[in-house]
Image: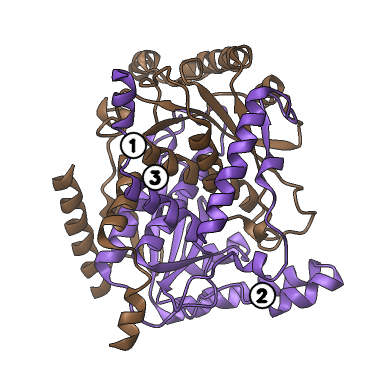
Chain colours: A purple, B brown
Amino acid sequence: MESLETTASHAFAESDRAAVYRAIHTRRDVRSEFLPQPVDDAMLARLLLAAHHAPSVGFMQPWNFMVIRSMAVKRAVHQRFQRANEEARALFPDHKRDIYSSLKLQGILDAPINLAITCDRSRSGPVVLGRTHMPSMDLYSSVCAVQNLWLAARAEGLGVGWVSIFHEAALQEALGIPPAIVPIAYLCIGHVSHFDNQPALEKIGWLPRLPLEDLVYLDQWGNTDGASHQTLLAQLGAVQAAYEAAR
Amino acid sequence: MESLETTASHAFAESDRAAVYRAIHTRRDVRSEFLPQPVDDAMLARLLLAAHHAPSVGFMQPWNFMVIRSMAVKRAVHQRFQRANEEARALFPDHKRDIYSSLKLQGILDAPINLAITCDRSRSGPVVLGRTHMPSMDLYSSVCAVQNLWLAARAEGLGVGWVSIFHEAALQEALGIPPAIVPIAYLCIGHVSHFDNQPALEKIGWLPRLPLEDLVYLDQWGNTDGASHQTLLAQLGAVQAAYEAAR
């Protein structure tokens, strides 16, 4: 029993645990709901500190944070989005192209803060602990910084939208980013009128939420046999029912 | 004033906001502190649901979750880690190689749950909204799932360690993962004796925490001029001082 008590002591209190799950489950990719109110600098600083405390491979901290406030720079970025978006639109089959055209996919000019998060792959020298066999690990570290910031923003009541419809070189050019630095995410950040109850692409029927049960395997790819797997599936059902009931 | 009230209503209450930041700032990459206690299935189910609610490009949800409980499979994975780790060790310069050798870099055999998170790049067909110009966006979506799970685990009192010292093909072989499916993260999950106060690699002096101020630019790469940037730097200082004082 003593070890169980030790274990329990590292868990957050119930209400704090619920707050973390609330950030995770009510986070949205915001495109249309930005308000013009400025973002407080202390709030932005807390978001950046949260991003800076993401995990990074070999503790290399490969990220930079480019805060974009200039309307001229936002316009330059927006033009590059529009060009890429025309190209992307043409690739969809007819029945999806009309829906695609009707979607607002970015809030570049609406959001008071735009933020580019990058990855400097040479940050701590050529050999990085944990990157030698999986060379993308440094890029993934910068992605973890994005997700930390996104969840912190939700807790602050700020919306975040990740815009990925750019040619990498065009974005580098608009922001003066050297060719060796990888742009990971271009984020629009601001206060919002509301947070949708579900992801926008789910809401409009672009794609359905996949059943979580179908995505979980035991020990080997594709394996769903085994008593422990059935127990887990039952719990997945219960946890999802509780989640749906609370929405 | 009315719009400010509307704005404020989306922010979490102060204690809930603090809980989200606590998860972000006290999350650790755990390698040595795993306890043998089993992980409750309901807890694991909550973690998987949190991962499943990560953002994904075009709502494609490209992830699968492989729960590894079999000691035989863990041993097979551990052997592949050992082989890759010998190769990695040899790449470090002399003065770092001894430190590297002394580090425990994984808890594969110690953690009751191992979890592989993958990316199926063909999940929703060849054309994915938001991936046409940045082809790595689907991989990044699976990374966001990792970070969601990691923060949820911290709130549950569970430690998580991300092991990346594998040849991709060797990991695919040990887990029966098809060649077209990308292994993104191999995670060790379990209860822990304690969470360190700072990242292990920072603690032992492998690399220092970078000053956040040096990583933030305004409008263009490398630019630190401008009154708004000075104001933000002052806030970054204040936020970091508050963070350090609270540790």
The chain under label 2 reads A
Residue at which label 2 appears: A83
Residue A201 visible from this viewpoint: yes
Q: Earlier in the sequence, mark 1 or mark 2?
A: 1
Name the amino acid, label 1: Ala
**Extreme-bottom residue of the structure:** B1
Q: Earlier in the sequence, mark 1 or mark 3?
A: 1
Residue B201 visible from this viewpoint: no
The secondary element bearing badge 2 is classed as helix
Tag in front: 1 or 3: 1
Residue at which label 1 appears: A11
Residue at (43% x, 56% y) in the render: A22
The chain under label 1 reads A
Residue B236 vs residue B6, the one in the foreground: B6
Name the amino acid, label 2: Arg
Tag in front: 1 or 2: 1
Name the amino acid, label 3: Ala
